[in-house]
Amino acid sequence: MDSTRRTEDEQAARWNGPAAHAWVEAEAVLDQMLRPFEDLLVEAVLAEPGRHVLDVGCGTGGTTLAVARRLGTESRCVGIDISEPMISAARARTQREGIQASFVRGDAQDHAFEPATFDTVMSRFGVMFFKDSVRAFTNLRRAARDDARLRFVTWRGPDENPFMTTAERAAAPLLPDLPARRPDEPGQFAFADPDRVHRILEESGWTGIDIRPVDVVCTLPEKELVGYFTRLGPVSQVLPATDEQTRARVVETVRAAFDTYVHATEVRFTAACWLVGARASTAS
Ligand SMILES: C[S@@+](CC[C@H](N)C(=O)[O-])C[C@H]1O[C@@H](n2cnc3c(N)ncnc32)[C@H](O)[C@@H]1O
């Protein structure tokens, strides 16, 4: 099997396995934590005309629905995600909330979108997991109308986001099998280098590329913190295979490492991200 196919399979497996179920279970906490980015994207989408919106790597649909709610019944908002559990959760939520939006389970790298359909392609942290980013953004360009806009948020590097690596740094001495982050592989920090993001978008038929830093304060309830780091991220991947005693020590050690972010009943940290904008190039 070639390595491209292997990585795609790994990503598909990851987002259809425990990681997806963890995201679904933590939906409310994650939506609260990432709400400032939802607001950023909603404002960016509403600032320009056009009501056909594609949300890439939409997860359980929080951002898709926030945009659909604001655009109203004339809009056509579509979320795509590779994860069946996440898409099922998004569909259930749409029904629950009575909002008009639709969800597709598919790989954004090669899903057969109807060509030249969307006025806006957006994403909240859903575009860093492609094995072939140029293929993905070329496919998204094909789905976009000429001059459509692209708006997404993505993480800057781990050095600027110490909250995100607190758990693995604290747990490393206790968990020898902890998987290492691979910055050159698909993953949370794969778009940390803005020059790389610029190159990918340029090669994929996007123009007017604007990549600006945004530093955003995010919060979650302190009572959700242990659930957060035991369910999500590298520590959560190895924790189920450890014995009870080690697990208890990891939880205690990691929880203490987060103390600096805890303010009474709230956990607070600054997320260092890029807000990326571009337009679908009309040059053929
Ligand atoms: C970090 S989560 C973000 C989810 C959501 N946008 C949010 O902010 O709550 C990344 C999402 O990208 C999805 N994803 C990963 N690779 C994908 C691909 N090739 N095509 C579509 N979705 C993908 C995952 O299944 C996951 O839902």
Image: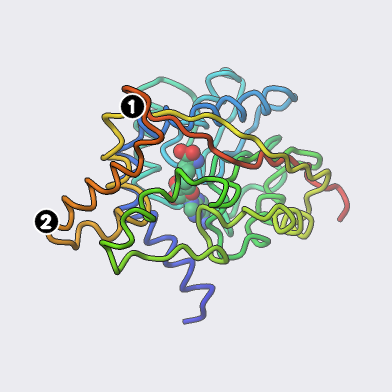
Asked which quadrant contains residue 266, the reply is top left
Q: Judge left or right: residue 5 versus residue 41.
A: left
Ligand 1 lies under 8 Å from the Cβ of mark 1: no
Residue at position x 37%, y 55% in the image = 168
Residue under pointer 1: 221
Name the residue carrying label 2. Answer: 245
- Residue 41 appears anywhere in the view: yes
Residue 119 appears at what percent x and percent y? 71, 35
Label 2 sits on what residue type?
A: Gln
Closest to the observer: 211 or 150?
211
Marks 1 and 2 in Cβ contact (< 8 Å):
no
Q: Residue at x 72, y 22 (%)?
A: 47
Q: Is residue 270 left or right of residue 178?
A: right
Position above or below: 226 against 140: above
Q: In the depicted view, which residue is nearer to us: 250 or 92?
A: 250
Classify 123 as above or below 66.
below
Q: Residues within 10 Å of mark 1 (few under 14, many from 20)?
A: some
SS of the residue under disc 1: strand
Is 117 situated above or below 237? above
Provide residue 73's location: percent of width, then percent of height. Answer: 56, 18
